[in-house]
Image (cartoon, rainbow, N blue to C red):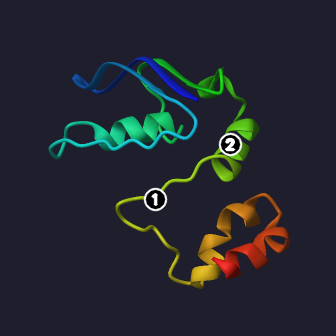
Amino acid sequence: MIEVKNLCKSFGNTQILHDINLTINDGDYISLTGRSGSGKTTLLYCVSSLDEPTSGEVMIDGANIFDKTESELHRFLNQDVGFVFQFHYLLPELTALENVLMPARKCKAEDEHKAFAKHL
């Protein structure tokens, strides 16, 4: 379960997210819609821990992700979060398979996941 509580995000004097509260239960599918610049990407970055909110909490399975140590946060990003960016951010010097296996490579588990990645 993902719970967002009183989430705010500002860049300088510009507040992008204002007191956002959101609950996403396991198995839910959601869609964020809105005009360009309305804060959709900023919200996703905060919920995925790629950016820290100015205030508020992001709870995943009851734990605030911003209370994690740096190594716990890296493990969380590499093993628990799936994120498809609007722009692909692929490394051009790597093959498609090597790009897909990048999180496993960072966790030193590339061999363990290679067969499944090839299957996909």
Give, as a three-letter code, the residue at label 1: Val
Residue with the mark numbered 1: 84
Q: Residue at x 60, y 48 (%)?
A: 81
Q: Secondary structure at mark 1?
A: loop
Mark 2 in CB contact with mark 1 (< 8 angstroms): no
Image: 4 above or below 30: above
**Which image quadrant is residue 117 in?**
bottom right
Residue 18: percent from left, percent from top: 28, 19
Residue 67: percent from left, percent from top: 66, 22
- Could you tell me how far apart the alpha carbons at marks 2 and 1 are, in whole angstroms? 16 Å
Residue 98: percent from left, percent from top: 65, 78
Label 1: few (<14), some (14–19) or many (≥20) C-alpha neighbours in 10 Å: few
Residue 32: percent from left, percent from top: 30, 42
Identity of the residue furthest to the front in this view: 27
Q: Residue at x 36, y 65 (%)?
A: 87
Give, as a three-letter code, the residue at label 2: Phe
Mark toward the start of the polypeptide (2 vs 1): 2
Q: Secondary structure at mark 2?
A: helix
Residue with the mark numbered 2: 76
Give left or right: position of 52 versus 34.
Answer: right
Label 2: few (<14), some (14–19) or many (≥20) C-alpha neighbours in 10 Å: some
Image: 116 above or below 56: below
Give left or right: position of 48 versus 112.
Answer: left
Q: Residue at x 84, y 69 (%)?
A: 112
Q: Quadrant of the C terminus?
A: bottom right
